[in-house]
Amino acid sequence: MDFDDTEEEAAFRAEVHAWMTANARERDPGQLATSHSFYDFDDIFVKEGKLWQHRIYDGGYAGITWPVEFGGRGGSFVEAMIFREEEAKFDVASGLFAVGIGMAGPTIIGHGTDEQRRRFLPAMLRGEEVWCQLFSEPGAGSDLASLSTRAVRDGDEWTIDGQKVWSSGAHHSDMGILLARTDPEAPKHRGITFFLLDMRSPGVEVRPLRQMTGGATFNEVFLTDVRVPAANVVGEVNGGWRATMTTLANERTAGRGTSSFPQILQLARECGSTTDPILRQRLADCFIKSEISRYLGFRIQTALSKGMSSPETSVAKLLFALSAKETAELTLSLQGPLGMLSGEAAPGHGFWQQQFLSAPSFRIAAGSDEIQRNIIGERVLGLPGDVRADKDVPFKDLVR
Ligand SMILES: Cc1cc2nc3c(=O)[nH]c(=O)nc-3n(C[C@H](O)[C@H](O)[C@H](O)COP(=O)(O)OP(=O)(O)OC[C@H]3O[C@@H](n4cnc5c(N)ncnc54)[C@H](O)[C@@H]3O)c2cc1C
């Protein structure tokens, strides 16, 4: 198998690299993180992220895999991956549009009306509107279909009441993709409708949640008598689960960035840890997992580019979350007693300490470890399905 770029891919990479060089500052070899990243999700990240997306749009690289008729480039998954790999070498505020362009956009393309496509897609690509995902609730995460936020039709509008949680970036979002129950008489998957919510609507209250990293990237969102136009329903009323599947499939196949192993090796050298027999074992282990992740990424992109679904996404997600935890622990061990410091006092300005505190969340976000294992068990190993006794029971009769 040949993992090198084809002639066309190499030409595209060179073109992207030249464009990046003309439009952004390359990261210093020792620079661990971009100056403004998703982990901050503050005013500056939002401002810089919008400017950067607009520049990508002007350069003709916005929505690489989106069809041309919807303002995209009509390119391949491999081209999108090449763009991400090259972008990661530069100090730019990327990731602000992960929900918008990465998830809401493809869902609107697949299930939305022409009017919705005209209204929302160009604004996303130009970096004008930030989107958040309002799916999870205090009582509905892994079992998303048990959500209880309620929407009731009232003339040309819907009235929405309920609570969402874990809503990343909601405090800086203009729009949200929202799931609400519209038919409690139907079984749980069949009474849900998919809405596009203007986050500035009266009755939307966003409360940031402080995390152990010190940052506040996600929120609780309270919805009280929120009015949403009927024109903002995506797909069929009560048939929102189909659109939801498109959103979640796009979330699972989102790229996970490039390997940080070269920086970890550099850290080991700087800290004089390369002769420690135990740390050497852990370094080799970290390298092996980083390579497996890379090759899994290639397999996934290959399957997707052929229009095939790829169960490797669950394997890759599991490995990513596990490796993030092990890698973070390793980097603090490499630092010895300095690993106990944080912020500016710590090596790398506390970057690895931040990674250490963020890593546990990766095992929950976008489908927990256990859910990924269930998917692998059912779809790859052919094991009997998870117990779903409530699948056909009307939602209103479920014990919650
Ligand atoms: C960093 C981060 C960002 C997030 N951002 C968003 C966002 O922007 N928008 C949004 O809507 N949501 C977001 N989420 C929420 C995320 O999707 C949920 O946390 C996740 O689906 C798990 O749901 P839960 O927290 O309710 O846990 P639960 O579903 O209650 O799970 C609790 C535990 O039980 C296990 N479990 C549950 N069901 C099974 C089963 N059938 N078999 C075996 N074990 C099981 C789980 O693995 C877990 O260990 C985010 C989460 C994190 C951590």
Image (cartoon, rainbow, N blue to C red):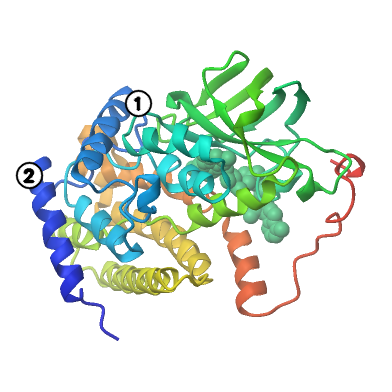
Left/right of residue 192 with respect to residue 321 in the rendered view: right
Figure check: 302 above or below 90: below
Residue 363 drawn at (x, y percent):
52, 53
Give the residue drawn at x 65%, y 66%: 374
Nearest to N terminus: mark 2 or mark 1: 2
Residue 76 seen in render: yes
Q: Foreground residue, 32 or 149?
A: 149
Q: Residues within 10 Å of mark 1 (few under 14, many from 20)?
A: some
Q: Is mark 2 within 8 Å of ligand 1?
A: no
Tell me the amino acid under the disc marked 1: Asp
The residue at 30%/58% (across/down) is 80
Describe residue 44's horizontal placement relative to residue 234 as left or right. left
Image quadrant assignment for residue 25: top left
Q: Position of residue 146 (x, y in %)?
A: 76, 44
Q: Position of residue 198 (x, y in %)?
A: 53, 24
Q: How many marks?
A: 2
- 224 to the left or right of 188: left
Dot 2 alpha-carbon crowd within 10 angstroms: few under 14, some 14 to 19, many 20 or more: few
Q: Residue at (50%, 63%) from the top-left corner?
A: 318
- Residue found at the far top of this picture: 202
- Name the kind of residue labelled 2 in the image: Ala
Instruction: Determine which of the numbered discs, if any, sits on residue 113 in the image.
Output: none
* Disc 2: which residue: 22
For residue 218, above or below residue 290: above
Most extreme residue toward the right, as rendered? 397
Checking the image for residue 42, the label placed there is 1
Real-space CA distance between mark 2 and mark 1, rounded to the nearest whole angstrom: 27 Å
Q: Quadrant of residue 320?
A: bottom left
SS of the residue under disc 1? loop
Q: Is residue 194 above or below residue 51?
A: below
